[in-house]
Image (cartoon, rainbow, N blue to C red):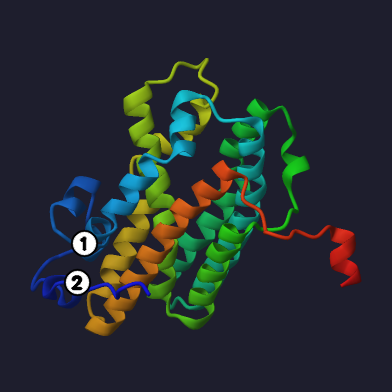
Amino acid sequence: MAKPLHFGAAFLYGRAGAPCLDFIENEAEVLSMACFTEELRRTADPIFTAIFAHPFVRGIAEGTLAKEQLIHYVKQDFEYLNAFIRVYGIAISKCEHRDAMALFNEQISFILDSETHPHQNFCDVAGVTYEELQGFSLAPSANHYVNHMLTVAHEGTREDIVAALLPCPWTYTEIGRRLLEEVKPEPSHPFYEWMHFYGDRESGITMQLRRLLDEWAEPLPAAHKQRLAEHFVTSCQLEYMFWDMAYKLEDWPAPVTEAEAVRA
């Protein structure tokens, strides 16, 4: 059984007078103030490091991923992002102010209208159309991740939802930046567009969600902050598992066809 997470008093009870959200203009300012989300990131650093070193991520850097791996990733991520949209919708229903509602609504539009571009990059390299890869069942790890997010969304507060959602954009932003710095891809690189899509986002949704969570978590009791940390770390672990699922072409141990499923 996994040991429970333990955090210091400064993490759980906050730092007196630390202005974690007020009028923050840039990422450097956030990182200089040791806010709640910085502590979350520090706690999850071993998982982030493992993700950066994962062979699927290295395959993006080296342009060596197999067609089947790209296809499996897009099939699963399309359905995962559908769930992400639903979680944003639930978050809207738990917000009291329009600024947060507007942020979540903007992210729904972003997924629908913009986050198709990195999928299209993978599809182009794999030699398939995006439409061919939609509507497939979730593999075990993706199913686990989706169920985790939806459970938190339905049973938790707005703070719980943001803690569970945050690792997805945060890990992708850091992956993109690292790959751009390391690879310095030319336009001829097969994943040039993917790396620039995620790596060129200076602050974006990651910083916006961090600002929200830092503000909302500040007055919460220690037990609730502990729960937020557990949601965050679980989502980080599931981010790693999602990459692993795509790389290994993970499927259920005894998969059934659609016709068999209907008869059952």
| x, y percent for residue 18 | 11, 67
Measure how far apart labels 2 and 1 are at the Cα level: 9 Å
Residue beneath the point at 19% across and 72% down: 7
Kindly tell me whether residue 201 is visible in this rendering.
no
Compared with 142, 188 (above or below) is above
Compared with 112, 4 (above or below) is below
Pointer 1 residue: 39
| x, y percent for residue 247 | 55, 41
Pointer 2 residue: 7
2 and 1 marks in contact (CB < 8 Å): yes
Residue beneath the point at 66% across and 54% down: 251
- Badge 2 marks a residue whose secondary structure is loop
Residue beneath the point at 52% across and 27% down: 191
Q: Amino acid at mark 2?
A: Phe
| x, y percent for residue 65 | 56, 30
Tell whether 31 sits left or right of 143: left
